[in-house]
Amino acid sequence: MASSAAGARVSPISPVASLARFFPDAAPVRIPVEVSCASSPTASNQAPRKERTVIEFGTPREVLFACAEPLEFADVVHLRNSDGSLDTEASVVAVQYHLGKTIVAARFLQEIPNWIIKPL
């Protein structure tokens, strides 16, 4: 018996989109940023590593992105875009690990007046 969906192609959902399902206000965005771990409860006296990534989803209070750094719940990350209009810290509120990447949701530690996603 042939399936009616046999010829249909289903695009795989991205790991960040999968995490975004838990954030009802999440909207897709594409904001290139540099992320560094500002503080970590498990970090020793290591210099923070910086990494370029893209914020893929955002809410009025959170950003969601993938990175290579093994972040954990409650880690504080510093986020900065190329022109400095976003230059803030956020606390990791959710993580998922997927194929060597860390999928992160981080909540801003302070209000971001120029953030592109505003509460309704």
Image: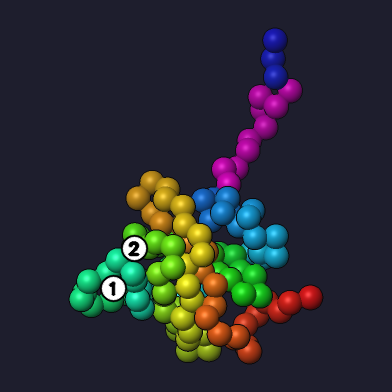
**Would residue 26 be counted in the magenta stretch?**
no
Q: Is the residue marked by circle 2 packed among few (<14), some (14-19), or many (20+) residues within 10 Å? A: some
Q: Quadrant of the C terminus?
A: bottom right
Q: As displayed, is residue 101 above or below residue 91?
A: above
What residue would you read off at disc 1?
A: 49
Q: As displayed, is residue 5 above or below residue 14?
A: above
In the image: residue 27, left or right of residue 34 = right
Residue sitting at x 34%, y 71%? 40
Q: Is residue 119 visible?
A: yes
Q: Quadrant of residue 37?
A: bottom left
Q: Quadrant of residue 101?
A: bottom left
Tag 1–tag 2 contact (CB < 8 Å):
yes
**Amino acid type, mark 2:** Glu
Q: Which residues are magenta?
A: 4-13
For label 2, the SS is loop
Residue sitting at x 51%, y 51%? 15
Residue sitting at x 54%, y 78%? 108
Front in this rendered view, residue 63 or 10: 63
Residue sitting at x 42%, y 79%? 78
